Amino acid sequence: MKKDLDYYLSLPYRMVITPDTEEGGFTVLCPELPGCITCVENIDDVFPMFNDAKKCWLEAALKEGIEINEPIPEESYSGQFKIRMPKSLHKSLAEHSKQEGISMNQYCLYLLAKNDAVYNISN
């Protein structure tokens, strides 16, 4: 398949939306395309402005011969990883998950998702 503008525009690039607490509105960026960023005042403008910024970025990259990263498909991730931790943390997590009435796996997933959401909002 020819990797032209239409090809890259058809790919599912990620969009990260961050509220601008100082000036209002939102900053929208594409992590896979360094420097592909736009700002919007209204949340309703996010998609059209992101798509426009992405198109302009891709056009410039193709013209200048800049390497274009492609999104990493979710199928590349198994959804599993192993982790070693101190016994004291293992004990604490096991006790907290028992108090919540859920498995330790579910409790750890909850904690990771909660922290990831906070991280994504602050970045």
Image (tube, grey):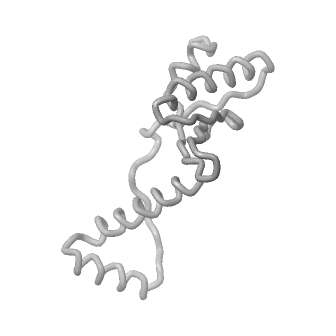
Classify residue 24 by image quadrant. top right
Which residue is pictured at 23% across the width and 75% down the height? 100
* Residue found at the far left of this picture: 101
Using the rendered view, name the quadrant where residue 5 is placed.
top right
Relative to 4, say whether 53 is above or below.
below
Query: In the figure, is residue 38 to the left or right of 113?
Result: right
Q: Quadrant of the N terminus?
A: top right
Work out whether 1 lies above or below 95.
above
* Residue 50 in the figure: left or right of residue 74: right
Residue at the image position 34 percent from the left and 64 percent from the top: 110
Where is residue 6 drawn, in percent x and y?
Answer: 57, 13
Q: Nearer the viewer, residue 51 or 12?
A: 51
- The x and y percentages for residue 87 are 42, 86
Q: Position of residue 89 (x, y in %)?
A: 42, 83
- Residue 75 or 57: which is nearer the viewer? 57
Q: Residue at x 56, y 41 (%)?
A: 25
Q: Position of residue 59 (x, y in %)?
A: 70, 17
